[in-house]
Image (spheres, rainbow, N blue to C red):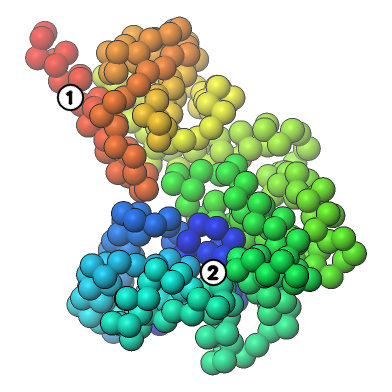
Amino acid sequence: MRVYHLSHTDLDGYSAQIVTNFYFKDIEFFNSNYGKEIDAKFNQIVSLIEESLYQDESKKSLILVTDLNLSLSQCECFEKKAKELNAKILLLDHHQSGLECAKKYPWYLLDSSRCATLITYEFFSQILGEDSDLGEFVKMVNSVDIWLKDDIYFEFGKVCLGLVAGAKEINSVMFTKESREYIFYLLKKAREFMGKDNAHIKLDGATHGLKKEFFIDGDDDTLSNLISKYVVEKLTQDRAKFEINYLDKKGILTYNIGNTSVIGNDFLVANPDIDFFLDVTSRKTMSFRANGNADVSQISKHLVGGGGHINASGGFYAGFKDGYIYEDIRSQIAGLIKTKTESIDESK
């Protein structure tokens, strides 16, 4: 049986996945905030199960949802789809807002007295066996997630809460798997501090170094430079996924990449056959970079009425609709470019 585990994007959500990662080997992870993003990620899971059934009709699947509460309409839709796929569905959550759903659907297990990580651990450990080290980690997550201020792990949990919230160095839309692995790594390292005197203070002081440890591959450098090197390598390894074209110019499209000047220029130096670098953000802004092969001031002006310099320009794409899946974002930008460049062809 293959497990598809969809969970929230905070300490409790990722920690529930750390629990299932301990117990299951054939498992794939997805993370989501609330609302429409849950639907988008569920549809991803459905597509993967359909693909799996195409290859092997006897393949069994479990759709596991943790630390996310669903609406009644989502429950109805998800249950129907799971039945069509001959898949099981199980939700383990602690948000009281899901009470109506929990009363109607037997697979919707709700307990507001425990965090989702503790619910998940106790559910699977009763079947597959307990683990003392993992159990202590789970207690820590529970202490901060349901705010047990007198618990011995509470202050340490607060640091871990910030550790996950601040782990923005790898874009989760573009590099979904890598972003999750990064957070898993930080929490694994954090667990090594548990049991030490003033563990919360020591972990807080060590956070910057732990982040650098993940990115270092060779010589030490500033965290900013290490991140840029890491992202450039990832973009280069999977260039086909991120490439776009503007007329005869070849570009790379990123989303909310951050530090565009450094990463964009580093990528263009490492990939001289790429003419421009474009980052679009959830704020509808577009940042263009080039390295002498394209006039991005003219590209940005033509596409969105933007402008700037030959090698560094920007603009505002008012029609951009923020998304949760990179391919959907790329499709929007490719559509914009196609529409604008077709008008050029027609005028010739």
Specify whether residue 128 is in view: yes
- The residue type indicated by label 1 comes to Thr
Q: Callout 1 environment at 10 Å: few (<14), some (14 to 19), or many (20+)?
A: few
| Depth check, front residue: 139 or 2 | 139
Give how far across and how far down residue 189 sits, in percent. 74, 60
Element class at badge 1? helix
User: Relative to 148, does residue 206 appear above or below in the rendering?
Assistant: above
Q: Residue at x 32, y 83 (%)?
A: 103
Q: CA distance from mark 1 to mark 2?
A: 42 Å
User: Relative to 31, does residue 224 appear above or below in the rendering?
Assistant: above
Quarter of the image where one finds residue 183: bottom right
Give how far across and how far down residue 45 sits, in percent. 33, 65
Identify the residue position indicated by label 1 in the image: 339
User: Relative to 107, does residue 74 appear above or below in the rendering?
Assistant: above
Q: Which image quarter is the N terminus in?
A: bottom left
Earlier sequence position, callout 1 versus callout 2: 2
- The residue type indicated by label 2 comes to Gln
Element class at badge 2? helix
Identify the residue position indicated by label 2 in the image: 17
Is residue 218 left or right of 112 when viewed as pictured?
A: right
Q: Residue at x 62, y 54 (%)?
A: 164
Q: Callout 2 environment at 10 Å: few (<14), some (14 to 19), or many (20+)?
A: many
Quarter of the image where one finds residue 88: bottom left
| Depth check, front residue: 158 or 216 | 158
In this rendering, the count of numbered labels is: 2
Give how far across and how far down residue 318 sits, in percent. 29, 26
| Depth check, front residue: 203 or 154 | 154
Q: Which image quarter is the C terminus in?
A: top left
Q: Residue at x 50, y 35 (%)?
A: 257
Is residue 41 left or right of 277 when viewed as pictured?
A: left
> Which tag is nearer the camera, tag 1 or tag 2?
2
